[in-house]
Image (cartoon, grey):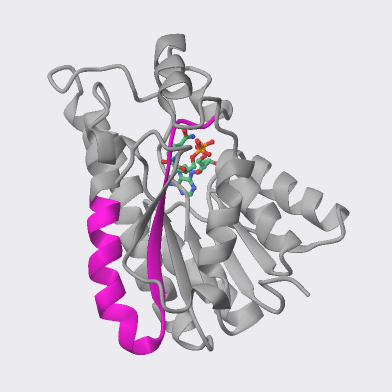
Amino acid sequence: MGPLDDRIVVVTGAGRGLGRAFAEACCDAGATVIVAEVDTETGSATAAALVEAGYRATFAYVDIASPDAVAALAAGVARDYGRVDGLVNNAALATGIGGSTFEEIDVETWDRVMAINTRGTWLVVRAFAGLLRRSPGGRIVNLASDTALWGAPRLLHYVASKGAIIAMTRALARELGDDGITVNAVAPGLVRVEATEYVPRERHALYETGRAIARAQYPEDVTGAVVFLLSQRAGFITGQVLPVNGGFVLN
Ligand SMILES: NC(=O)c1ccc[n+]([C@@H]2O[C@H](COP(=O)([O-])OP(=O)(O)OC[C@H]3O[C@@H](n4cnc5c(N)ncnc54)[C@H](O)[C@@H]3O)[C@@H](O)[C@H]2O)c1
């Protein structure tokens, strides 16, 4: 018996990094997982590896910046599964964009970050709301970031996009509460994944020495919180933001 037995879970951006770890943890907890990803290569490889490991997973293409692609993803899931029990909004532009001051960030990059991270999350929630309503207890988990909690410098577009995710989590919780759907966010700290290899050593050191648990953070440090928030046991928790960062930000 796993906490997500018989649950159908969609994880966006699950081709690599944290999303891939969430997909695997959900499978391991008993779920059938839809690996929704813009990168066909990593998305299909993730799904294939999960199937190879004996889990139930499929790859589905999506570009969350595109309303049409998001609608097509939801239509495909509706056709193949008929409902969704859990949605992990993990896809984001989360790499290669740090290091510029607020004065140096260009308008095009700002708009791209917002179009994917913030608008994309809204589009996905909007497209899947009907399928989540068909679940006996729908769950949405959004990926925020602790950068929005401590005000990380030289990353303003991303920080703003994740601050918006926190605000949207609270408002969506109220809009979806009557449908029995919970909406929560997890806010990881700086995680050691491909996406953060470009981050300067000093920024990694700031995190790794500044945590109450003073060490590097890995995807496995975050998966437990996501699986819990997707589970039946979390049914009366909604509108919350859970920092999962070894105690870098204490609130
Ligand atoms: N890594 C960290 O330190 C960290 C910390 C806090 C929060 N987060 C958040 O966790 C999530 C995953 O981050 P990660 O570090 O694994 O990053 P990542 O870049 O490795 O993963 C992001 C995934 O999303 C996919 N993606 C990007 N744009 C997409 C689009 N338009 N449509 C569909 N998929 C798209 C990418 O192809 C990739 O597979 C992000 O929301 C990120 O903001 C990461």
Q: Position of residue 144 (x, y in %)?
A: 37, 48
Q: Nearer the viewer, residue 156 or 66?
A: 156
Q: Position of residue 110 (x, y in %)?
A: 23, 34
Question: In the rendered view, does 210 fall on the left or right side of 56?
Answer: left
Q: Is residue 214 above or below residue 230?
A: above
Question: In the rendered view, does 9 fall on the left or right side of 96?
Answer: right
Question: In the rendered view, does 63 fall on the left or right side of 61?
Answer: left
Is residue 82 in view from this perspective?
yes
Q: Nearer the viewer, residue 251 or 23?
A: 251
Is 81 within the magenta?
no
Q: Position of residue 213 (x, y in %)?
A: 51, 31
Q: Which residues are magenta?
A: 164-191
Q: Is residue 30 above or below residue 251?
A: below
**Residue 126 sits in quarter:** bottom left
Residue at 48% x, 17% y is: 198
Is 168 within the magenta?
yes
Is residue 85 in view from this perspective?
no
Residue at 71% x, 47% y is: 46
Q: Position of residue 33 (x, y in %)?
A: 66, 64
Question: Which residue of the protein is positioned furthest toward the left in this rendering?
Answer: 103
Residue at 72% x, 62% y is: 27
Q: Nearer the viewer, residue 41 or 135?
A: 135
Question: How many tags in the picture?
Answer: 0
Tell me the quarter of the image containing the N terminus. Answer: bottom right
